[in-house]
């Protein structure tokens, strides 16, 4: 409620201008959990567009490093091609620097990080995570999604040739770049990524649950309906 004091000649009058709803405190440090292909990138991008949060995707950062042939890219490429995790120390150093470069109070969506308990502990030392949002999708659906995914090398937008089609199969709707299929989206590598997820990242569901930070959302169905649930979870 906003109250303004207005001057009158002989006495003070209280003028009620308007009644405002209670301010909603949105969660601003959000970890997206979920297996490869569960929609972390898709939902993270929508959150970033709607609320102006910074989306920090370790996968996108690593792919860019590989494309540019940086030291990090050279070290990471072999792990990524086989669907294995890049070593913790490389990822933790990369993310420490990136997080430190953001202004305090920036809303951040972590997409694909943390992926191990060691990474989660390192993140927890630097910032307080408000929410870990877990997208739950079964393995066969994940394989279908990843083997027909197309990605944009320029703006990192993702599409699916059946479920989330670009207007033209070859080009990105957002920036016009030629779309490509990620090397690790071939079926054998996808299945290895799912195994690596179960062994290393799945335990983070329990990790954040014990801290009272976990919300699980069914990640199957219409992308916009899932996004409505995501938005509810961050409020
Ligand atoms: P990364 O790029 O993070 O891959 P990932 O976690 O395997 O996740 P994806 O990008 O494959 O899937 P997503 O959940 O974002 O789904 P998306 O929205 O695209 O990592 C790649 C590699 O880098 C790792 O294997 C590892 O080597 C390394 N790496 C990265 N981070 C690391 C870390 N922290 N530590 C160590 N190593 C690390 O959706 C998938 C498809 O489904 C799309 O086609 C989309 O259009 C479609 N889709 C989305 N939602 C729906 C829906 N509701 N219905 C139907 N289709 C949908």
Image (tube, grey):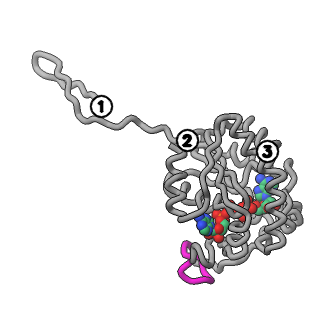
Which-is-in-front pick, marks 1 and 3?
3
Question: Could you tell me which secondary element the residue under label 1 belongs to?
Answer: strand
The residue under label 1 is: 2
Q: Residue at x 65, y 35 (%)?
A: 212
From the viewer's perspective, tell me whether residue 119 is left or right of residue 149.
right
Front-most of residues 85 and 172: 85
Q: Residue at x 49, y 38 (%)?
A: 25
Q: Position of residue 206 (x, y in %)?
A: 74, 41
Cα–Cα span, label 1 and label 3: 44 Å
**Residue 111, visible in the rendered structure:** yes
Q: Earlier in the sequence, mark 3 or mark 2?
A: 2
Magenta stretch, residue numbers: 166-175
Q: Which quadrant of the structure image shows residue 9?
A: top left
Ligand 1 neighbours mark 3 (CB distance < 8 Å):
yes
Residue 86 in the image: above or below residue 172: above
From the viewer's perspective, tell me whether residue 26 is left or right of residue 151.
left
The residue under label 2 is: 27
Report crowding for label 1: few under 14, some 14 to 19, many 20 or more residues within 10 A (C-alpha): few
Cα–Cα span, label 2 and label 1: 25 Å
Quadrant in the picture for the N terminus = top left
Q: Residue at x 79, y 68 (%)?
A: 190
The residue under label 3 is: 119
Ligand 1 image position (quadrant): bottom right
Question: Could you tell me which secondary element the residue under label 3 belongs to?
Answer: helix
């Amino acid at each position: 409620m906003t109250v303004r004091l207005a001057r009158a000649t002989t006495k003070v009058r209280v003028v009620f201008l308007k009644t405002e709803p209670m301010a909603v405190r949105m969660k601003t440090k959000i970890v997206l959990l979920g297996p490869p292909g569960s929609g972390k990138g898709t939902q993270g991008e929508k959150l970033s567009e709607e609320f102006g949060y910074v989306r920090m995707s370790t996968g996108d950062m690593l792919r860019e490093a590989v494309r540019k042939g940086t030291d990090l890219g050279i070290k990471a490429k072999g792990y990524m091609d086989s669907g294995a995790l890049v070593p913790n120390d490389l990822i933790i150093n990369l993310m420490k620097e990136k997080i430190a470069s953001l202004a305090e109070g920036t809303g951040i969506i972590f997409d694909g990080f943390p992926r191990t308990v060691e990474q989660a502990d390192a993140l927890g030392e630097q910032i307080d995570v408000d929410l870990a949002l877990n997208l739950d999708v079964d393995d066969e659906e994940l394989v279908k999604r990843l083997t027909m995914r197309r990605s944009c090398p320029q703006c990192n937008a993702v599409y699916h040739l059946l479920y989330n089609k670009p207007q033209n199969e070859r080009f990105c709707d957002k920036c016009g770049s030629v779309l490509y299929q990620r090397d690790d989206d071939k079926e054998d590598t996808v299945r290895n990524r799912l195994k690596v997820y179960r062994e290393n990242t799945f335990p983070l569901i329990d990790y954040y649950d014990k801290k009272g930070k976990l919300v699980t959302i069914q990640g199957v169905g219409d992308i916009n309906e899932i996004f409505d649930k995501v938005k509810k979870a961050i409020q």
